[in-house]
Image (cartoon, grey):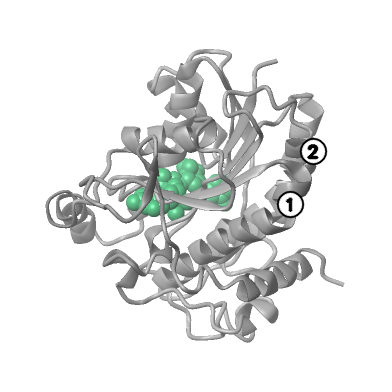
Amino acid sequence: QKPTAIITGASSGLGLNAANALAQSGDWHVIMACRDFAKAERAAQKLGMPKGSYTVMHLDLASLESVRQFVQNFKNSGRRLDALVANAAVYLPTAKEPTFTADGFELSVGTNHLGHFLLVNLLLEDLKNSPKNNPAGAPRCIIVGSITGNTNTLAGNVPPKADLGDLRGLTTGLDGRNSSMINGGEFDGAKAYKDSKVCNMLTMRQLHQRFHDSTGVTFASLYPGCIAETGLFRNHIGLFRTLFPPFQKFITKGYVSEAEAGRRLAQVVSDPSLNKSGVYWSWDNDKSSLWFDSVDGALENRVSEEVSDDKKGSKLWDVSVKLHNPT
Ligand code: NDP
């Protein structure tokens, strides 16, 4: 059996292009874990992903029941698990009111963080049991982060900034009765997305601290660059969608194509030299950063103060576990 990588949200953008890069390499079998089965199949065919190099499996991260069902279906498939990539996300910057997952959590944090949190926890044992003879050399678990977690960049400082506060909104269920925001504040769709990305990176660091030594799994996060044309911005206003790609290309120089971003994510999955655990990888489009350690073009980036707050990460872990196991 070929080494297997599960990629969530592989029906478009970064996930699709990473799935394509891994499938085309011939070294991997890719499980495309998607909520829209037909869309994923069409996208795979459009990119010419070889038949037999991928399997589409249903996963809706906005439903914990669906996450559990996906894990059961995966286990029933008898496949080994070598890499798990938590990539899917929703971004609702123009939403005036919160919307909620099947379990009643605000949709961005519910999907991007809580759905993935359960998925990773349920598949950790399978990763640990990987035969380890995959191209990366060891099993990997990757949670896609974002620039919002590096306050050492301009984009990471654009308001509304991520801020989980003391997690009081999350602690009370994130169901809108007290608050639909992690910090207990007023709903703000752009901030909810950024908060969810901070949760993704805090979770990766917690996984590393709690399980790297005992499981041998390499945990990592990454910022692939600004992929300004993906579906992520589908809910933004038209003018933004028109101006954002050239702005990123010519002004910030943070722009990266979907194909290149996909190669970067595939590199974090498969490149044996990116074997350090607990790292947040980035790429310098200008190749001008002198203050990072670089491995095969990937840079070990610094994270923001909030993302490096391991006490907060630990509290986030405990609250997230409780939300998945209501008494
Ligand atoms: P896309 O919108 O193109 O891809 C998001 C994927 O997530 C889609 O496949 C979507 O499925 C899937 N998805 C959304 N909700 C669910 C759900 N409930 N269950 C299962 N799948 C779901 O965006 P990107 O490719 O840009 O985003 C991918 C990752 O990259 C995200 O984690 C994002 O935060 C990160 N990122 C993106 C950047 C960018 O500039 N675009 C920059 C930094 C990070 P469907 O096709 O059915 O909608």
> Up-down: is 198 above or below 249?
below
**Quadrant that contains the C terminus:** bottom right
Q: Quadrant of residue 263?
A: top left
Q: Is any atom of residue 234 visible in this view? A: no
Q: In front of the other: label 2 or label 1?
A: 1
Secondary structure state at the residue bearing disc 1: helix
| Percent x, y of residue 102 | 67, 60
Residue at mark 1: 211
| Percent x, y of residue 23 | 50, 21
Earlier-in-chain disc, 2 versus 1: 2
Amino acid on which the number 2 mark rests in the picture: Gln
Residue drawn where x is 74% and y is 70% of the image: 318
Amino acid on which the number 1 mark rests in the picture: Phe
Residue 279 lies left or right of residue 76; in this view the side is left
Given residues 294 and 70, the one toward you in this image is 294
| Percent x, y of residue 181 | 54, 78
**Quadrant that contains the N terminus:** top right
Say few, some or many: other residues with alpha carbon within 10 Å of mark 1 (under 14 / 14 to 19 / 20 or more). Answer: some
